[in-house]
Image: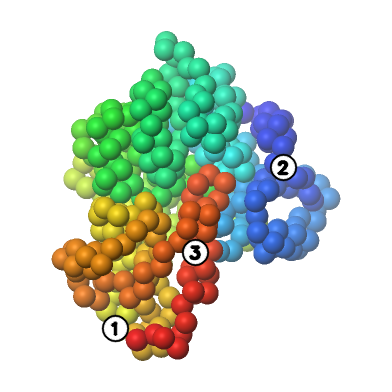
Amino acid sequence: MERSELESIIRATGASEECGGYVFLRDPFWSATQQAAFVALKAKHAHPAQKSARGWLCIPTGGSSGGLKFARHDEQTLSAAVRGFCEHFNLKHVNAIDVLPPWHVSGLMARVRCAATGGKHVAWDWKRLEAGDFPEVSANEPWVLSLVPTQLQRLLKRPAACAWLKRLHLIFLGGGPVWPALAEAANAAEIPVVLSYGMTETAAMVAAQQPEDFRNGDRSSGKPMPHARITLDDESIVCITGESVMRGYLGEPDLARGFRTADRGNFDEQGNLHIAGRRDEVAITGGEKVNLSEVEAVLRGLPGFEEVAVIAVPHAEWGEAVTACYLGAKDAAFDQVINSHLLRHQCPKYWLAFAPEEWPRNAQGKLNRAALRAAALARINPSRQS
């Protein structure tokens, strides 16, 4: 793909801004703090008069964990990702139903894959899909769709949506952990789910299953794709090298085409990648380490919660307190069930119920954990910590 073609795709999103040799993708739902961070980043770094030859496309990242950053990509990094994608799934043309916003890397790459391969791209509003308004898909052409787990969970509640999903060739599920109950429901509905792993910094997915893997009970993120090499360092942190890796963050030195993620992982005997959670998802409470993602996985597997997230908040006596934030109802007998699944130091000290309109999601339905933690802290009175 030539730069001019990629620039045309970016302009067509209606979510771009050119400044000082860079082209920025902008999220119209940024908070005031993130908007101010964007203005400050532009003022500090986007001042060269000439066009940047490499890393000129700045894609926002870091919104779910707090600070705003921009991963610098270009036509070469994105083209490498497209080639690896097509080879991994044996696709000559990519036809995509796209419900994710273009300022998100998954929504952007759906557009780029279709354009680069001469496929069809159908932008579709997520609310229309959720309400049962489904785009037409030809039975003799392979169509793909990318969803986050919460979106799939909502669609699975509707028989008509399940029937439509079964007509697609591949449904990529990423952007967060897939809890056991959701995986079982998707398998029971015979939905062609493909679990994958990737991020803005790698131009979307760098590991993915094959279509039959999920059907056969595999719940890994699949094998590394042709354009990426994935290794684990001494701390089991996932490291990625390859041509689709970003040039670097805006304002930081270029990378040597290698990127150390924030995720911990392991490989099984078949060479499949398993993500064990983020390296910062560990709380120290009373001197004991608690893996928050493990606690969250247990809670997600139990009835009573529509959605749940486990975070850590400061505590005067214990250092940090494990805190469960949730949508849904928690009855009095629930504590007994929790105690049978978790060790004493793993059990949440705080249970915070949220209304659906209070649950902080971004435009693609992904939980904003930084906003959730801020809301949790606002609810907890330090004088009542015990």
The secondary element bearing badge 3 is classed as helix
Residue 93 placed where, x, y %? 49, 19
Q: Which residue is painted at 61% across and 58% down in the image?
A: 69
Look at the numbered discs 1 and 2 and tell me whether their residues touch, using CB distance below 8 Å: no
In the image, taking residue 192 as reference, residue 314 lies left or right, namely right
Residue 370 placed where, x, y %? 52, 64
Residue named by callout 2: 16
Look at the image and tell me whether residue 41 can be seen.
no
On screen, 2 above or below 60? above
Amino acid on which the number 3 mark rests in the picture: Leu
Instruction: Return the mark for residue 372.
Output: 3
Amino acid on which the number 2 mark rests in the picture: Ser
Residue named by callout 1: 287
> Across the whole image, how many numbered discs are drawn on residues?
3
On screen, 205 above or below 87? below
View extreme (top): residue: 140
